[in-house]
Image (cartoon, helix red, strand yellow):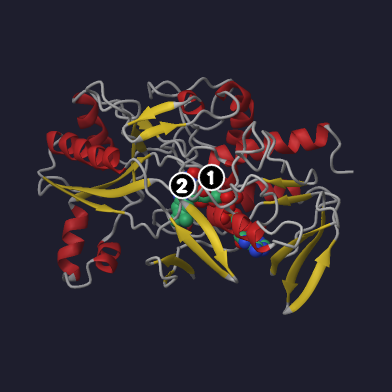
Amino acid sequence: MWYERLGSDNSYRAFNPGNYYNVGGNSKFYGAVLMRYRAEDFGAIQHREGVSPAWPFAYDELEPWYSQAEQLYQVRGISGEDPTEPFHSQDYAFSPVPEEPAIAQVRQRLKANGLHPFSMPLGVDIDRWLRKAKTPWDAHPNCDDGKMDAETTALAKALCYKNVRLQTGSRVTRLKTVADGKRIEKVCFIKDGQEQELSPKLVILSAGAVQSAALLLRSASAQQPQGLANSSGQVGRNFMNHNASAVLAISPWYKNTSVYQKTFGFNDFYFSDDEGGAPLGNVQLLGRVSGKILKANLPRVPQWLLNKVSSHAIDFYAMSEDIPHPESRISVDGERIIMQWKRTNWQAHLDLVKKLKTVLKAAGFPIVLSRTFDKRTPSHQCGTVRMGHDPAMAPLDVYCRAYDHPNLFVVDASFLPTSAAVNPALTIAAQALRVAAHISAKDLQS
Ligand SMILES: Cc1cc2nc3c(=O)[nH]c(=O)nc-3n(C[C@H](O)[C@H](O)[C@H](O)COP(=O)(O)OP(=O)(O)OC[C@H]3O[C@@H](n4cnc5c(N)ncnc54)[C@H](O)[C@@H]3O)c2cc1C
C-alpha cells in the first residue's frame, strides 16, 4: 500500500498502486509497447501549462542505444508510417504484429479521414503468445511465452555471465555510506525474515521511480539527514505520471472480432492540436476491453449488456505529457510511502480526449465514452531521481551516477527528466544499456 495525503493535517488515505514486485518488474505485466521518445522530446517543449525542459543530451546520443534495446527486446515494428518518428540507425528486426481484420478496418477509416495511424512497436511474438491462450497480453504476466520483458530478454542475457547471480526474495531496506558519506558502503536487505548486508564496490539501484526515491530518502543518516544522493533536495521531487484516459468507441454496425486488438496508434496531435496550438499527446489502442473488464468497473450493469457493448466497441488509450514540478513528489513517513502527484498539463489531456472523440465519431462510431485513469494508477511513474548537468538541480549526472556518491548509479524510470507522451520502458532500457557501456568502458566496477 502507498498513501496519499488528504489535507494539511497529516492524515493519509491508503491505496493499492497496481505496481508489481517480481523478477522482471512491471514489464512482466506491461502492455509491451516499446516506443522511442520523439527527437523533439529531448529539447524544451512549450506546453499549454508550462515548459517541458530539455534533456541534458540530445536524441542522437541515445539513438544507438534505442536500436540496441529494440534488438534486445525483439521489437516488432516498421519505420516510415508515423510522421513524428525519429531517425532509426537500424531497422526493426521483425515485422509488425499482424493486424486483425476488425482493427485493420478502423485503421483504414482513420487513414481515409486524413490521420496517420502507424503499427505500434511491440515486444510480442504473437504466434507464441496465442499458442498458450487467445487473450490480449496487457496486464497478463509473461511466463516466457512470447511477451518480451526485462526478465526474459535483458536479465536472461545477463545471467549468461559467470559473475552474475540473481538472488530472489530479498527486499532492500537501506543503503549505508562510509563515515564521510562519499561512498555507499553497505546494502542492507531482508531475506527469509533475516536482516543481511552486502558490501559491493558499485551499487546500481533500479527499484522503480517510487521505490528508488523512497529507499534513498529512508537511508537518511546523521551526515545526510535529507537522505542519500540528495544534496540537491530533488530526490522524490518532479514525480511524473502520464495523464491518461481509456476511450471506447462504440457502433451498433461495427463488430469487434479481435483477440488482442492492440496494433496501431497515431501521433497526429503529438506536437500540436492540429490548429497551431500546443501539443496534446499520443493515441494508441488498448488491449481488448472485454465484458468482464467492463464489469469490474461497472458492477451494476448486467454482464450480458457489457458483453454486447464490448463486441461493438474498439478501445483506445489517450496519453498526454505530465511536466516536472518540484511539489509533485514522493516522500516517506517511516515505512510509509507518500505520493503527492500534482498533475500538470491537464487541459491538454482533456483536449486530446475531445479530439479523439471527434475523429472516432467521424470514423463511424456514434457513441464514444471516456474514463480517466485514476490519480492513483502510477503505471508510468518517473522523474524522482532525475539526471542533469547541474548538481544543485539534479541528483544524477548524464550517466545516472549520483553526484554525491560516485559508486552509486540509479538506473530506472527515476532518471527521466521528462515524461514525454510516450510509454517509458524502451527509453529506460536504452539508457540502461548506455550506462552499462559507460561503467564498463571506464572500468568503474573494479
Ligand atoms: C499495467 C502496466 C502496463 C504498462 N504498459 C507499458 C507499455 O506498454 N509500455 C511501456 O513502455 N511501459 C509500460 N508500463 C510501464 C513500465 O512497465 C515501467 O515504466 C517500467 O517497467 C519501469 O521500469 P523500472 O526499471 O523503473 O521499474 P520496475 O520495472 O518496476 O522494476 C523495479 C524492480 O525493483 C524491484 N524492487 C522494488 N523495490 C525493491 C526493494 N526495496 N528491494 C528489492 N527489489 C525491489 C521490483 O520487484 C522490480 O523487480 C506499464 C506499467 C504497468 C504497471
Compared to residue 247, the image places residue 92 above or below, namely: above
Proximity of marks 1 and 2: CB atoms separated by less than 8 Å: yes
- The amino acid marked with disc number 1 is Gly
The residue under the point 33% across, 29% down is 279
User: Which residue is tagged 1?
Assistant: 383
Residue 74 position by quadrant: top right
**Distance Cα–Cα, label 1 vs label 2:** 6 Å
Compared to residue 277, the image places residue 244 above or below, namely: below
Q: Is residue 267 left or right of residue 427?
A: left
Residue 390 point in image, percent of width and height: 64, 33
Residue 300 point in image, percent of width and height: 18, 73
Q: Quadrant of ligand 1?
A: bottom right
The residue under the point 77% across, 75% down is 195
Residue 5 showing in the rendered view:
yes
The residue under the point 75% across, 62% down is 222
Q: Nearer the viewer, residue 102 or 358?
A: 358
Residue 33 point in image, percent of width and height: 46, 42
User: Which residue is tagged 2?
Assistant: 240
Compared to residue 234, the image places residue 4 above or below, namely: below
Q: Is mark 2 within 8 Å of ligand 1?
A: no
- The amino acid marked with disc number 2 is Met
Q: Earlier in the sequence, mark 1 or mark 2?
A: 2
Residue 167 position by quadrant: bottom right
